[in-house]
Image (cartoon, rainbow, N blue to C red):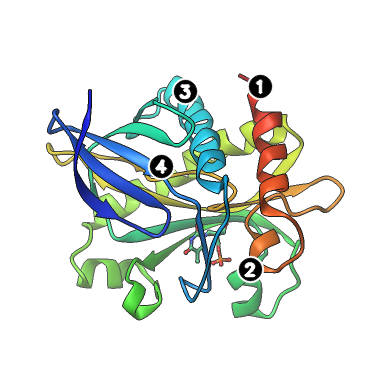
């Protein structure tokens, strides 16, 4: 299979068509952004780390019988995915208070939530990805109520699998962001990436093993992500 024309260029990825209408070729890039793109930096090696970490996680999710967009890793920076139409929602699940949730409710980071909380953000850079509720999702015609319930159920199910995967390498899954997409037949499956860019991962000794090292200038992103990948590879 070969990549053909460029379909889409995002903040951290390029998507190409292939000879197969149902398959896209994804290349992970080295750009790191924070503050919804207002801060941008090229960090050599970041794309390769995220592609390898995401590929390992999606292989594990596929092996658990979950239907995802992931087909195979092609190289350190490339993978093949099923083509989907992305639902413009960032679906965030929180196990522990951190980040914007701590800010919004004036809480200390680190409080364990009794029940995981699922939130929706509307994917729209011009609007700064606003926090929205189920009725806004309906109003914007993004998904039906049945689909909204499916997204929440599926995200909670994925949380249970991810918590185990990260716990195996000694990390607590604090929160994460998922994106879902529709296949040509309308079915909704998990898409995008799962990496330290899109998840908060805390070590037992309180280290941030995720993009917060970049967002908060508290550590080296490449060193941190390399440690995560090295640990994950041992669980293959
Ligand atoms: P938040 O606390 O900033 O709302 O982030 C919650 C989780 O979602 C965190 O693990 C980082 C992830 N996330 C993304 O992957 N992309 C985004 O644009 C944002 C805002 C958060």
Q: Mark 2 Cα within 10 Å, few/some/many (few <14, many 20+)?
A: some
Residue 11's quadrant in the figure? bottom left
Nearer to us in this view, 203 or 154? 203
Instruction: For marks 2 and 1, give the CA distance.
Output: 29 Å
Total marks placed: 4
Q: Earlier in the sequence, mark 4 or mark 3?
A: 3
Q: Which of marks 1 and 3 is nearer the N terminus?
A: 3
Callout 1 secondary element: loop
Nearer to us in this view, 183 or 93? 183
Q: Residue 99 bears which disc, if any?
A: 2
Image x and y of residue 229, in percent = 64, 34
Query: Which residue is disc 1 drawn over?
Result: 235
Residue at 28 percent across and 45 percent down: it is 15
Marks 2, 1: nearer the viewer: 1
Instruction: For marks 1 and 3, give the CA distance.
Output: 15 Å
| Disc 2 Cβ-to-ligand 1 distance below 8 Å | yes
Query: Which residue is disc 3 drawn over?
Result: 64
Image x and y of residue 233, in percent = 64, 25
Q: Residue 154 bears which disc, if any?
A: 4
């Amino acid at each position: 299979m070969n990549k053909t024309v460029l379909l889409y260029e995002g903040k951290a990825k390029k998507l190409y068509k292939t000879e197969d209408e149902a398959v896209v070729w994804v290349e992970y890039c080295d750009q790191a952004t924070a503050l919804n793109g207002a801060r941008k930096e090229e960090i050599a090696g970041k794309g390769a780390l995220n592609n390898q970490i995401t590929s390992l996680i999606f292989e594990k999710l596929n092996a658990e019988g979950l239907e995802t967009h992931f087909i195979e890793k092609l190289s350190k920076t490339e993978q093949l995915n099923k083509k989907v139409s992305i639902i413009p929602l960032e679906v965030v699940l929180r196990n522990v208070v951190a980040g914007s949730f701590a800010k919004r409710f004036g809480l200390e980071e680190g409080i364990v939530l009794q029940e995981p909380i699922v939130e929706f953000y509307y994917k729209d850079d011009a609007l700064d990805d606003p926090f929205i509720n189920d009725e806004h999702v309906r109003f914007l015609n993004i998904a039906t109520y049945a689909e909204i319930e499916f997204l929440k159920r599926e995200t909670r199910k994925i949380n249970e699998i991810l918590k185990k995967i990260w716990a195996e390498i000694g990390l607590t899954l604090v929160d994460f962001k998922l994106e879902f997409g529709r296949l040509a037949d309308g079915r909704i499956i998990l898409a995008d990436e799962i990496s330290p860019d899109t998840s908060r991962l805390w070590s037992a000794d309180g280290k941030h093993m995720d993009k917060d090292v970049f967002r908060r200038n508290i550590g080296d992103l490449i060193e941190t992500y390399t440690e995560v990948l090295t640990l994950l590879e041992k669980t293959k």
